[in-house]
Amino acid sequence: MLLNSYRFGRFEVRPSQRVVLVDGAATSPGARAFDVLMALLHHRDRVVSKDELLDLAWPGLVVEENNLQAQVSALRKLLGPQAIVTIPGRGYRFALEPTDTTPLAAAASPPPAPAPGAHPNLTHLPLVLTPLIGRTLDVSNLDTLMGQHRLLTIVGAGGIGKSLLAQWLLHARRSAHQHGVAWVDLAGQTAPEFVASTVAGALGLQTGHGDPLKGLMEAVRPLQMLIAIDNAEHLLDEVARILQALHQAAPQLQVLVTSQAPLKLANEWVYRLDALALPEQSAPLDVARQYGAVALFAERAQAADRRFELTPQNLATVVEICRRLDGLPLAIELAAARVPLLGLVPLARSLNERLRLLNGGGRGAPARQKTLRAALEWSYGLLDATEQTVFRRLGVFVGSFSLELAQQVVADTASHSTLDAWAVVDVLGALVDRSLVIADGGDTPRYRLLDTPRSYALEQLSAAQEDPALHQRHALAMRQLFEQADSDFFSGQQRIDDWYKALAPDLANGREALAWAIQYDPQTAVAIAPGLAEALTSDRRRERRYVWQATALLATDQLPAGLQARWSSRAAYFWAYRQPALACRLARRAASLYRAQPGEKRNLYHALAALVYALTYGPTPNLEQRQEQREVLAEMWAMEDPAWPPIVRSYGLFASLTCNFVEGNFDAAIEQLLQKAALDALAGHSEALLRGEDIIAYMELAAGRVDASIARYLALQARLANTRHMATLLLVQLHLTGAWLAKGDTVQARALVQACWPQVLHFDAQVYAVDNLALLAALENRPHTAARLLGYADTVHAAHGKAREVNEARCAECAEHLARAALQDGSFDRLKTLGTGLRHDDIATLAFL
């Protein structure tokens, strides 16, 4: 239902009178422009596609797309350039905010709540899937094969449609697996050592602190799910190694891989994807249009030119074009996108000449690769100079990129340049229309180049001698993004969970920029590091560690003081538990620099919190260190402002409660931890809340509240069951084992720790379990075993490099007291020494007799 009027600041739109008032004066933008305006207003909650606007403003007519562009231009002149936003590859959206309280349309219904027990959406599939044409039989075949094989690899040339086919297959099977489906894109990952953590991150899994592959193996062990690993060809050896391990570790896991070459694993079933089917030249229209190649060309040509129609008269030309392109989907899309410019017959003539010219390419290259390269060469040659510039410059992006990033990196800053930010918008839309750039997502899409077009774009960038400058622009854009992200994290303007989600699509570009900057621009590398390291999330600890280690030697005194301080403060917090002596040095440096800079109270507070945290976990503190810790805490609390965002104050509370806990002030530590949980809830930081629940239960056990600790651990175990948080679940179960032992319930403790032991080995989590095993043996009146297990436990803790935490220390002390008392012959020390030589693989037989 239309309203009487719409008001937007100086503007009022009156539908019944078909006028627009500007400062109260009536104007008429023209009949067609007004129809376009009404269509945009009526659907202002979303992007309206070009085809939809053409149908609404010119009902029943076929008109040129430039007519629509002319009307939009007229409206922008009237309402201002920001009134109507172009979303390249999607359409247009009305962007002015209403100034009255009358809703323009009924509020959209909230999305339905997930069904009870439904797994959270961690698929990472695009929100909007490109239509799949000509692959019905392939989807059916693959669906059948997925029911028969645990590892299936779709093999085919670049541009043949492997990724899209895999996406549709996952979409079709998303409810067929208890733990869902997940999409892992390796296109942006170039380092083999991070493939396992990339897979884990895409699956939303925790892999622990040790070997990421072992952690991944244990995390997926109980899962019944389907994962797809896309673009594996450049990491074949590492992907094969990982999948071989997962095949053995997780019997309910199925994997679908897309690659230009098979993995060559014994358990792999290879599905070779052929080109789209082609009809005989003499096939009638109703038969020919059922073939995939012809159907795809017709659909893409009509999307590019609404007037296009497949007819008996043009069928032979279309079939010939598809045949010349070997039925290769990407090549067909590139050609069909040129129908509006060239017309069908000139297109066929131009394409044939171009292919003949390029057929003499690499002698050893497969025919389809020659065809695709020829099609790319041909399509690139038909772009004007500005379009060629934008296309090749987009090659610096790894994975997807936003419109804003494209403008920032691709546009020229010179005032006389025609390639400004607005020109990039227009050209990007044209490249999407021509299938050279893919638009992913919904109303605010992200864009990407497929692997083969990106490789070609980089070749052209190098040929134009623009690659050094564009990689620098890309790195500077990533610096701005991640510096702002670091600031936003502590601003309180965004939920922390949303912050992580918003940055996830740019991680590949961040890693690429960091790698370039480490070699060519150290200051930019140091500036990127804090935001990028935090955005990698705790599940990617090895990548986080790499970021801090790779930039450590670059963070010198020659850098600006603010940058030195920010890097040092964030790095100090990361290293506080792992390398406390290093963290203390970094935190003191950051605090000193921030004290010398006015207006840095919040950042100084963070640096002081890092210093308190690091001093807590350092070597056994002397009186001087204790005095420093007290002084730092006093300074930190004196400057805290209750108006600061919850996430900022959460850091100070954590440092203080850790100090209280280590000193044995358990009640104070628990009270502060509950306060921290309230702050984390306000900040929208679900991961911190989850960790906090485990820490509260641990502290309750330390404070002697055994029953309360058991109740909290049981509730937390139930929450984590059947989720992908396997590392957290294991930690909870090991701590719960300690609580059962504190209560004297050896039956519950034995059953739980024995069931967990295989996961303990895979996660390298022995440090949390070994003292429990020794106490279990002592309570079961097996003192010889208890003594040997205590020797093994000492070895494990020494290798870990940390003293026992309070509950583990109590376990060990109690086990030793019971074992010594039971061994009247004085053999305890000898048995304990023997235990130091036990291997991890010996423990199950010894502990669970």
Image (cartoon, rainbow, N blue to C red):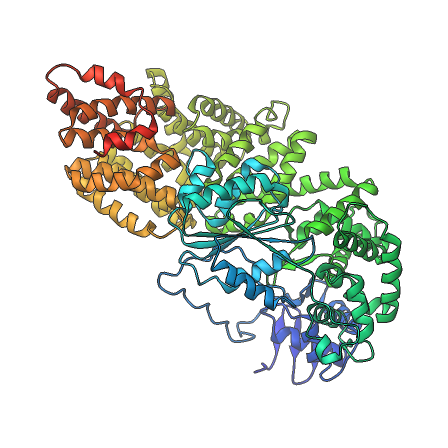
Q: In this view, does 24 lie to the left or right of 555?
A: right
User: Which one is nearer the viewer's eye here, 365 or 404?
Assistant: 365
From the top left corner, tell me how far across and down residue 463 is, in percent: 83, 42
Quadrant of residue 176 in the image?
bottom left
Residue 205 vs 793, above or below: the answer is: below
Count of all numbered marks drawn on residues in the image:
0
Residue 408: x, y in percent?
Answer: 71, 48
Name the residue: 15% across, 39% down.
745
Q: Quadrant of the C terminus?
A: top left
Indicate the quadrant where residue 5 lies.
bottom right
Q: Residue at x 26, y 50 (%)?
A: 715
In the displayed structure, 594 sits above or below 107; it is above
Task: For residue 676, say whether it is visible.
Answer: no
Q: Which of 553 and 791 is in front in this view?
A: 791
Percent across and percent down for residue 300 are 72, 68
Q: In which quarter of the image is the N terminus?
A: bottom right
Residue at x 12%, y 15% (from the top left corner): 825
| Closest to the observer, 711 or 612 | 711
What is the x, y in percent for residue 175?
A: 44, 63
Tell me what residue is drawn at x 63 percent, y 74 percent: 41
Inspect this view and state whether residue 167 appears.
yes
242, above or below 449, in the image: above
Q: Horizontally, is 785 left or right of 262 in the view?
A: left
Q: Residue 306's quadrant in the figure?
A: bottom right
Query: On the picture, is 144 further left or further right than 777?
Result: right
